[in-house]
Image: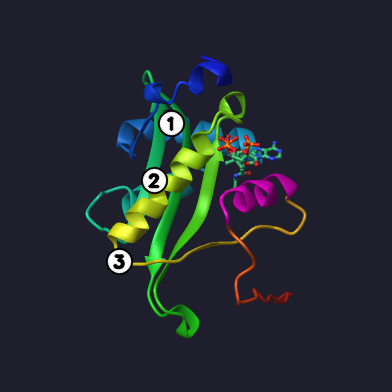
Amino acid sequence: MTSADLKDTTAIVIRPVEAADLGQVIAIDAESTGIQKTDYWYELFHRFGTGHSRQRLFLVAESEGTIQGFIIGEVRDWEFGSPSCGWVFAIDVRPGARLAGLGTKLFDSICAGFRHAGVDTVRTQVSRDNNLMLSFVRSQGMMAAPVITLEMSLD
Ligand SMILES: CC(C)(COP(=O)(O)OP(=O)(O)OC[C@H]1O[C@@H](n2cnc3c(N)ncnc32)[C@H](O)[C@@H]1OP(=O)(O)O)[C@@H](O)C(=O)NCCC(=O)NCCS
């Protein structure tokens, strides 16, 4: 199935992840990042994929039995004094399925989940040099937040 086929959005279902999807999720992530992190994904599935919490969301985009992408996020309450907001910390669309609107559908769906959980703000973090992610988040209407991330080496 091509990106052109996937633009027929009726063919796409956005739903909570299931255990049987994990192999495809791991493969999509490995293709994007070059790292196979099987244990990490099973751990994430146990924390975010049970569907028992409105605060934690792990969604996949499926078409005809194939997982085309996923998004993960959670509501964090009073983190560093900030009122509760939704955080997106992972999104990935299969390379052959990109530019067909799936990233937008996944993002819209997790935002709907955050609203359902009672928050009205969504945040994420993007590397300054990641032009693809910057272009995507800008296209969704995101702008610089009134917070900054700091770090230092512990070596
Ligand atoms: C970013 C990503 C999720 C976008 O998914 P997608 O399904 O292609 O996104 P959409 O088709 O909904 O695109 C929405 C908008 O994003 C922007 N965009 C998406 N891909 C782009 C690209 N290659 N170049 C420039 N802008 C782009 C465009 O503004 C686009 O709107 P348009 O099609 O009207 O121009 C996808 O490219 C991806 O998974 N990239 C890898 C992310 C990654 O590294 N994840 C691992 C760490 S979390």
Left or right of 78? Residue 148 is right
Please tell me whether residue 137 belongs to the stretch shown in magenta: yes
As drawn, 30 above or below 138: above
As drawn, 87 above or below 7: below
Left or right of 90? Residue 64 is left
Q: Which badge, 3 or 1, comes first in the chain's sequence?
A: 1
Q: How is the image coloured?
A: rainbow
As drawn, 69 above or below 115: above
Asked whether the beta carbons under mark 2 and mark 3 sit within 8 Å of each other, the answer is no
Q: Nearer the viewer, mark 2 or mark 1?
A: 2
Find the distance from the CA under tag 2 to the CA under tag 1: 22 Å
Between 73 and 23, the one nearer to me in the picture: 73
The residue pinned by badge 2 equals: 109
The residue pinned by badge 1 equals: 23
Q: Is mark 1 within 8 Å of ligand 1?
A: no
The residue pinned by badge 3 equals: 118
Disc 2 element:
helix
Binning the other alpha carbons within 10 Å of mark 3 as few (below 14), some (14 to 19) or many (20 upward) gives some
The amino acid sitting under disc 3 is: Gly
Binning the other alpha carbons within 10 Å of mark 1 as few (below 14), some (14 to 19) or many (20 upward) gives few
